[in-house]
Image (tube, rainbow, N blue to C red):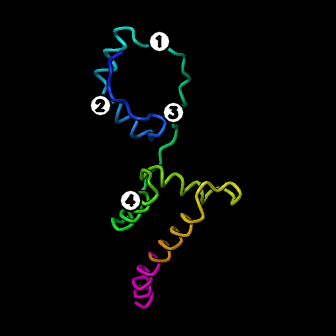
Amino acid sequence: MTERNEPEFANMTDAELAEWQYAHKDELDAEWEQGDYEPVEVELAPTFEVTRSFRLPVADARLIDEAAERAGTSRSEWIRRTLLAAARPSTETAISQADLRRVADLLRSAEALVEPAVGERRAS
């Protein structure tokens, strides 16, 4: 095997691991071709069968991006976890109480921004 300075793979996120493997794909392929690796049996995870899509205002998208960044996760993962937390009974909640409080604060802020426009619309 080629000598190289390899990171601590166990401490890497899936995204970091994928990025590292992509950056070193030529080296890894060459090592495979040279027979430096033994094949292993793997079980592939089932593919996702449902895709959901929705539109939202730019300001809301920014709030979601900021929340995902604060949580240290991808936008997709943050949305998935937040939606599942809202859909599950409270005993199965996978989102932290701190994240729930942040979401509630964001919703209150959004309501405060929208309420004046709704009030004007009702008055007319």
Q: Amino acid at mark 1?
A: Glu
**What segment carries the magenta color?**
110-124
Circle 3 — which element?
loop
Disc 4 marks which residue?
Answer: 65
Disc 3 marks which residue?
Answer: 47
Q: Amino acid at mark 3?
A: Thr
Say which quarter of the image contains residue 5: top left
Vertical order, 99 against 110 (above or below): above
Q: Amino acid at mark 2?
A: Ala
Q: Residue furthest bottom?
A: 123
Left or right: residue 20 compared with residue 102: left
Vertical order, 52 against 63 (above or below): above
- Between circles 4 and 1, the one closer to the viewer is 1
Taken as a whole, is the magenta stretch helix, strand or loop? helix
Say which quarter of the image contains residue 58: bottom left
Disc 1 marks which residue?
Answer: 38
Contact, mark 4 vs mark 1 (Cβ under 8 Å): no
Q: Earlier in the sequence, mark 3 or mark 1?
A: 1
Circle 4 — which element?
helix
Residue at x-position 43% and y-position 82% = 118
Circle 2 — which element?
helix
Q: Earlier in the sequence, mark 4 or mark 1?
A: 1
Left or right: residue 26 compared with residue 64: left
Q: Earlier in the sequence, mark 3 or mark 4?
A: 3
Circle 1 — which element?
loop
Residue at x-position 48% and y-position 54% = 78
Q: Position of residue 3 (x, y in %)?
A: 33, 21
Residue at x-position 36% and y-position 15% = 1
